[in-house]
Amino acid sequence: MANIMIRRSDKGDYVFYLPKRDLEDTIISMEFDTPEKWGGEIKLNNGGAYFIEPQTAPERLPYSVRAKRLDAAE
Amino acid sequence: MSNLTREETEALIAEVLEVYPEKAQKDRAKHLAVNDQSVEQSKKCITSNRKSLPGVMTIRGCAYAGSKGVVWGPIKDMIHISHGPVGCGQYSRAGRRNYYVGVTGVNTFGTMNFTSDFQEKDIVFGGDKKLAKIINEIEALFPLHKGISVQSECPIGLIGDDIEAVSKKGAVELNKPVVPVRCEGFRGVSQSLGHHIANDSIRDWVFGRDGKDVKQEFVPGPYDVSIIGDYNIGGDAWSSRILLEEMGLRVVAQWSGDGTLAEIELTPKVKLNLIHCYRSMNYIARHMEEKYNIPWIEYNFFGPTKIAESLRAIAAHFDDTIKAGAEAVIAKYQPMVDAIVGKYKARLEGKRVMLYVGGLRPRHVIGSYEDLGMEVVGTGYEFGHNDDYDRTIKEMGNATLLYDDVTGFEFEEFVKRVKPDLIGSGIKEKYIFQKMGVPFRQMHSWDYSGPYHGYDGFAIFARDMDMTINNPCWKKMEAPWLKKPEAEELAKAA
Ligand code: SF4
C-alpha cells in the first residue's frame, strides 16, 4: 500500500503522483469514474497499475488516497 | 564543427562506454541517450534518479546540501544550524550567492554559518544537550531571529539523536518555530531527496503554525501570487518579481531567495503558486493544491521568448486587467530585447552549447540561448527525475546528447568529440574545461554575475555569454614557440 495523489492536468485528464518515489504519470484508464463509484484499477501511461478501493468520488482534486500496487512499471 | 548525426552520437556514446567494466557499462548505458523528440516518455530512453556508480566521479551533492543549501538556507530571517561536524556547513557557506536585503548578523543571517561543531564526545554521548544549549545561545545572541531550523548532517542519523524532542522543547521556550530537518547526507541518491525532506518539514512544522509568526495584519487580495523555487541567485527573484508586479500581480512570498518566515506562512493565502524550479519545490505546491486549493503553474523567465510565453500563461489565470498588464509588460520591454539581440546575436549566432546543471536549468535556459541564435547540443541533470526529462525532450533538438548524472570522464570525452563553443556547468567542471581551452560559464551561481532571470537578466546573460565565448584569451592557448608561423606574419616580417 502506498499513498498516492490524484490531480487533474491542464488537459483535463487524471494525473497520478506517488510522493514516496517522486513518480508522476498520467492515468490512462480508471475502472470506475462516476460520482457514486470511483477508483478501482487504474492504469498508468508508463505501464504500471494500481488499485484504489472503489469509493464515492472526491469532492475536489487533488486527492490523496491509499492505493495498492498491482503491477510496477520498472 | 557541424552537428553530429544520430548514428554518430550513438557511436560516440558506445565509444565512451567502452572503457568501463561490463557491469558498469550496462548501468551507465541507461543514463546516456540520443534525444528523439518523438519519444513521449523519457523513461523509454533514459534512466534517472538512481544511485551513482561507486568509483566514478559524480557531480552530485547530498541531502543535507539540498535542504540546507537550497531550500532552507536562503530564508533569511531564520537561523539554520548545521547540526553535526563543522565541515558540511563551512565549506558550502555562502557559496550559492542567494542575495538578500537586511543587516547580516542582526535581522538576517544568510551568509553566516551556524554549526554545533560535533566532537568525538558528542558522537559518543549524543548531541542533544548541545543542541538545546545552542538554541538558547542563539536566542540570547541574535534576539531578532524569527526561528531556527536544525539541519541534520550524517552523524545525527547514525547516532540516533532525538532532535525532534529538543526542537519541540526549544520552540516552546522561545515561542518561535524550531524545525528539525532529517536531511542527513546519506539519505537518497542525491540532493533531490533533501529538497523533498525540506519541503515536507515546511509543511509539517511551518504551515502547522497557522501564521502565528506573521506580525502584521494580512488582507488577501485578488491578485496574490507567490514565487516558488527562485533562490535569488545574483538577484534572480528580484528581476522576476518586478515583471509580475508590473503586470498587476502582488507577490506575497518569495521561496526562498530573499524570503522570510512570515512570507512562507502567508503563502497558503495566495491565489496562484508560480513555480520556477519544479524539481526542488513541486512537493509543497502539490500539498498546497490539495490542502488549500491553490493551483500552481510552472513558468520560465529565461530569455524573452519564454518570458512572454510565461507571462501570458500566468495572466490566463486572472482577469482581463492582468492579461492587459502582461501584454503591456511584453510591449514595454520589446525595444530592450531588440537592442540586446541586435547587439549580441551577430557575435553569438550559431555557437553550440553543452549544459550540465541541476534542477531546472538544463531545460529552462535553452530558450535564452536560442533567443541569441545559439544552439544547445547536449544537456543533462545532476539529480533530475523522469518528469524532468519528460519536460526536456521537447525542448532539445533531435539527435542531441542527453546525459544523466554524467561522470567526469564521460563529460570530458563528450566535449572532446562534440567540440562545443561553450559549456555551462558547475565549479567542479570549470577549471578542467578551461584548461582544455573551452569557454566555460558556471551556470549554478552565474559565475559571480547575474541575475539571469527576466528581461534585465537577459541583458546580463547575453553580455556574459559574449564576454566568455569571444574572449581573446581562447586564442592564446598555444605557446608562442609552438605556433606555426602564419603566412601573413611572415609576409609582414619580410
Ligand atoms: S554527505 Fe553527510 S558529511 Fe557529507 S556534506 Fe552531506 S551531510 Fe555532511
Image (cartoon, coloured by chain):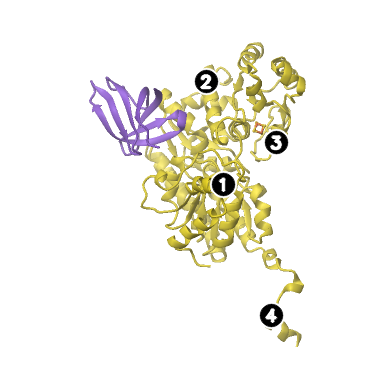
The crowd level at tag 4 (other Cα within 10 Å; few <14, some 14-19, many 20+) is few
Of circles 3 and 1, the one toward us is 1
The quarter holding residue A30 reads top left
Q: Are marks 2 and 4 in contact (CB under 8 Å)?
A: no
CA separation in Å, label 2 and label 1 = 30 Å
Q: Tell me which corner region of the image, top left, top right, bottom left or bottom right, holds residue B188.
A: top right
* Residue B76 visible, this orientation: yes
State yes or no: discs 2 and 3 in contact (Cβ < 8 Å): no
Residue at coordinates 47% horizontally, 46% vertically from top-left?
B30
What residue would you read off at disc 2?
B204
Chain at tag 3? B
Label ID, residue B93: 3
Across and down, in percent, residue B450 comes to 62, 48
Label 4: element kind: loop
SS type, badge 1: loop
The foreground one among A49 and B26 is B26
Indicate the amino acid at tag 1. Val
Dot 3 amino acid type: Arg
Characterize the local packing of mark 2: few (<14), some (14-19) or many (20 or more) Cα atoms within 10 angstroms.
few
Q: Which residue is mark 4?
A: B486
Q: Quick one: label 1, few (<14), some, or many (20+) residues within 10 Å?
A: many
Image chain in yellow = B
Which residue type does callout 4 highlight? Glu
Q: Chain of mark 4?
A: B
